Image (cartoon, rainbow, N blue to C red):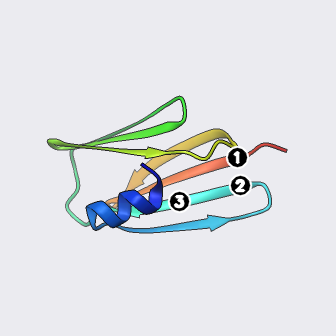
């Protein structure tokens, strides 16, 4: 699912920031998030949070994705093709 579908269906707060050479997406899973695994497989970010799994599709123009989680906020940084 796309970021918009993900946040609408799961009730998460998310933002997307567009820059000339990159896109940054941030999803707030809330405080107290401890047992989290984040992986990027092809064009999908997979988040496993306790017993729940979420998948966020990346844009086709994304060349390289970097993810990190801090204080319950997942950040996905995408470098755009030039």
Q: Tell me whether circle 3 and circle 2 mark residues in contact (CB < 8 Å).
A: no
Secondary structure at numbered mark 3: strand
Q: Quadrant of residue 35?
A: top left
State the separation of the CA atoms marked 3 and 1.
12 Å
For mark 1, does the 10 Å Cα neighbourhood hold few (<14), some (14 to 19), or many (20 or more) residues?
some
Q: Tell me whether circle 1 and circle 2 mark residues in contact (CB < 8 Å).
A: yes
Q: Position of residue 7 (x, y in %)?
A: 36, 63
Q: Quadrant of residue 31?
A: bottom left
Q: Earlier in the sequence, mark 3 or mark 1?
A: 3
Along the viewing direction, whichever of 60 and 16 lies nearer the viewer: 60
Q: Earlier in the sequence, mark 1 or mark 2?
A: 2
Q: Position of residue 79 (x, y in %)?
A: 70, 46
State the separation of the CA atoms marked 1 and 2.
5 Å
Q: On screen, 25 above or below 36?
A: below
Secondary structure at numbered mark 1: strand
For mark 3, does the 10 Å Cα neighbourhood hold few (<14), some (14 to 19), or many (20 or more) residues?
some
Q: Residue at x 40, y 51 (%)?
A: 69
State the separation of the CA atoms marked 3 and 2.
10 Å
Q: How many marks?
A: 3
Q: Which mark is residue 79?
A: 1
Q: Residue at x 59, y 41 (%)?
A: 65
Identify residue for label 3: 25
Identify residue for label 2: 22
Judge left or right: residue 80 versus residue 72: right
Secondary structure at numbered mark 2: strand
Q: On screen, 28 above or below 40?
A: below
């Amino acid at each position: 699912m796309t970021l918009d579908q993900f946040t609408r269906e799961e009730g998460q707060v998310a933002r997307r920031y567009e820059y000339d050479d990159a896109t940054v997406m941030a999803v707030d899973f809330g405080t107290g998030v401890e047992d989290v695994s984040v992986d990027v497989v092809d064009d999908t970010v997979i988040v496993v949070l306790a017993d729940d799994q979420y998948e966020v599709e990346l844009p086709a123009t994304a060349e390289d994705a970097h993810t990190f989680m801090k204080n319950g906020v997942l950040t996905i940084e995408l470098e755009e093709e030039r």
